[in-house]
Image (spheres, rainbow, N blue to C red):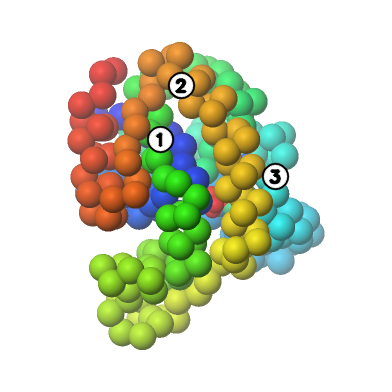
């Protein structure tokens, strides 16, 4: 069985694209905390409005809220399907709590994949990023291989692509620095637990996808 994957990556390292590939080809369940939060915002609820205030500034949602959200989702998963955690954990507290959750659910077969990317490349990718509101496929107007085929519409769904409100330079800087503040302790944590694999995310997206798939297959249980 394929291993469960925890992604640790700065914004725009390719988590979403790699996840899409794993879902399509290896029947992974994809749990993106960012997508869940954006759904809550789109619902127009009061809670969604509070989340919007936090996320549009590039700040992190509280550990309590995130842990609750992920816990209820993980419980609903069928134990025979591998899953991807995309966007969680983002703090050391979340990482430790996640371990407890996995333990109590009897889930062992899990690796952490670090998609390593520096600030300048991440920024350029973020500024060009657009995605399909329906299927969530991501495109990039600055990279030929990632451009939509016809203007600003999704290749598959043929509806207009949208830009995330937090994909601007100012918010990106806040998001990247908050990521850096937390990443090293999370990486140390997984390194010490022998769960960490590292992939160079500055390569083109197809290579990143291949490297991640190789890592998942090679990693020891
Ligand atoms: P993402 O789509 O993963 O880039 O997430 C978008 C935004 O949602 C982040 O910039 C945070 O504000 C919030 N968010 C997502 N996941 C988490 C998490 N695990 N902890 C705290 N905030 C989160």
* 18 lies left or right of 66: left
Residue extending farthest to the bottom is 151
Picture coordinates of residue 30, whole percent (x, y): 41, 46
- Per the image, the residue denoted by label 3 is 61
- Per the image, the residue denoted by label 1 is 114
Task: Say which residue appears at 38% left-offset and 24% top-offset.
Answer: 196
Task: Say which residue appears at 40% left-offset and 40% top-offset.
Answer: 116
Q: Is residue 36 visible?
A: no
- Report if the beta carbon of the residue with label 1 is closer than 8 angstroms to ligand 1: no
Say which element carries label 1.
Answer: strand
Work out whether 192 lies above or below 41. above
- Per the image, the residue denoted by label 2 is 190
Camera-near label (3 vs 2) is: 2
**Among numbered discs 3 and 1, the one appearing first in the sequence:** 3
* 132 lies left or right of 51: left
Say which element carries label 3.
Answer: loop
The image quadrant where one finds the N terminus is top left
Q: Is residue 206 visible?
A: yes
């Amino acid at each position: 069985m394929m291993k469960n994957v925890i992604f640790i990556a700065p914004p725009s390292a390719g988590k979403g694209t790699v996840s899409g590939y794993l879902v399509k080809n290896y029947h992974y369940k994809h749990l993106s905390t960012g997508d869940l939060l954006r759904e809550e915002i789109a619902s127009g609820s009061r809670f969604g409005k509070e989340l919007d205030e936090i996320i549009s500034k590039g700040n992190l949602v509280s550990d309590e809220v995130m842990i609750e959200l992920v816990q209820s989702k993980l419980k609903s998963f069928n134990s025979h399907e591998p899953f991807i955690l995309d966007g969680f954990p983002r703090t050391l507290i979340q990482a430790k709590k996640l371990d407890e959750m996995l333990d109590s659910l009897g889930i062992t077969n899990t690796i952490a994949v670090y998609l390593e990317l520096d600030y300048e490349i991440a920024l350029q990718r973020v500024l060009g990023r657009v995605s399909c509101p329906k299927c969530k496929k991501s495109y990039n107007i600055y990279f030929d291989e990632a451009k939509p085929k016809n203007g600003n519409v999704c290749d598959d769904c043929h509806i207009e692509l949208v830009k995330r409100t937090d994909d601007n330079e100012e918010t990106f800087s806040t998001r990247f620095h908050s990521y850096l503040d937390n990443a090293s302790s999370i990486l140390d944590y997984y390194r010490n637990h022998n769960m960490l694999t590292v992939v160079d995310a500055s390569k083109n997206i197809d290579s990143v996808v291949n490297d991640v798939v190789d890592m998942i297959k090679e990693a020891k249980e």
